[in-house]
Amino acid sequence: MIEIRNISKTFHQKKQAFKALDQVSLNIDKGDIVGIIGFSGAGKSTLIRTVNLLERPDEGQVIINGKDFTKLSSKQLAEERKKIGMIFQHFNLLSSRTVFDNIALPLELDHSSKDQINKKVNELLKIVGLEDKANDYPRSLSGGQKQRVAIARALANDPHLLLCDEATSALDPVTTQSILQLLKDINERLGITILLITHEMEVIKAVCNHVAVIDKGKLLAKGTLSEIISDRENPVIQQFINSDIMTLPQELNKRLQKEPEDGLFPLVE
Ligand code: ADP
């Protein structure tokens, strides 16, 4: 259903070139929950952003339901993007809008009628368990509730695919589990394919049936969760599995990557 074929992407900054993705290929079947795991800076966000062409690859193709996204006109691409929902680490809600109006936004942009909007938003509030919060503003919600609003908004146009960019990284472990359970329910009940990126193996283990491991812009491995875990030959994969590094706060994680030989960092900064 989704074919990422030999994607490469180089960023140019201050006269320096940096290859963020190097010939990455990945196939995702309809109805799958696929996790992309890797350290900070590995290229995960860039990869997920190439799927709906928020980031245009320098080389390669993204084929979704038979359509090559790299060849679509901007008008065609805008239409296709409506069918791809996206959620982010920091929810990206509009603070001046109520929960109801945040969820209604994609429908308003699509010129749906008032009745259609009311029906759909109420349906979505039920799915994400926030019927009693419709008139609240984001500032009065917990992180988990904000992410539920963001998920409802991502579902407004009945997407076939949900892209999740570190969707639980800003949440505590219990809330993380409830959001992951919601994503699982959405996948099972609505048949929506989910592609998520994370630096935490626990997230992958909780919901993904397929995994891709990315490191320094290259795809290191892909397969089922058990195939990846049992790959004893690959030292980077073993590092992900055996070490707590993936669950450390991101800043500390970055420092550990920069100075791995030192290792003596205070856990509380
Ligand atoms: P990850 O999501 O795995 O943390 P990213 O995909 O965000 O990694 O970034 C991969 C690399 O590409 C990083 O070194 C990052 O600094 C670089 N990068 C990402 N986006 C840009 C950009 N717009 N301009 C310049 N460099 C970028």
Image: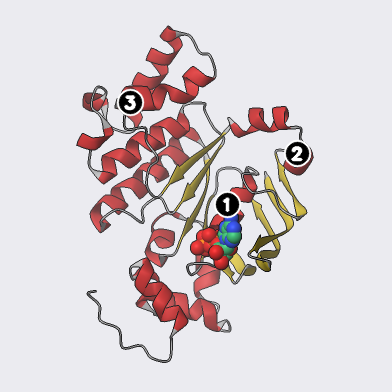
Residue at the spot of label 3: 97
Element assignment for label 3 = loop
Q: Nearer the viewer, residue 126 or 167?
A: 167
Q: Is disc 1 in contact with disc 2, using a CB cutoff of under 8 Å?
A: no
Real-space CA distance between mark 3 and mark 1, rounded to the nearest whole angstrom: 28 Å
Q: Where's residue 83, x and y in %?
A: 58, 32
Q: Where's residue 252, x and y in %?
A: 35, 74
Q: Amino acid at mark 2?
A: Gly
Label 1: few (<14), some or many (≥20) within 10 Å?
A: many
Label tally: 3
Q: Nearer the viewer, residue 99 or 126?
A: 99
Residue at the spot of label 1: 48
Label 2: few (<14), some or many (≥20) within 10 Å?
A: few
Is residue 211 visible in this depiction of the protein? no
Q: Earlier in the sequence, mark 3 or mark 1?
A: 1
Element assignment for label 1 = helix
- In the shown orientation, is residue 22 left or right of residue 189? right
Seen at 25% across and 81% down, the residue is 266
Q: Where's residue 125, x and y in %?
A: 32, 26
Q: Amino acid at mark 1?
A: Ile
Element assignment for label 2 = loop
Dividing the picture into quadrants, the one containing residue 222 is bottom right
Nearer the observer: mark 1 or 2; the answer is 1
Is residue 45 visible in this depiction of the protein? yes
- Residue 190, placed above or below residue 213: above
Q: Earlier in the sequence, mark 1 or mark 2?
A: 1
Residue at the spot of label 2: 66
- Residue 184, placed above or below residue 42: above
Q: Amino acid at mark 3?
A: Arg
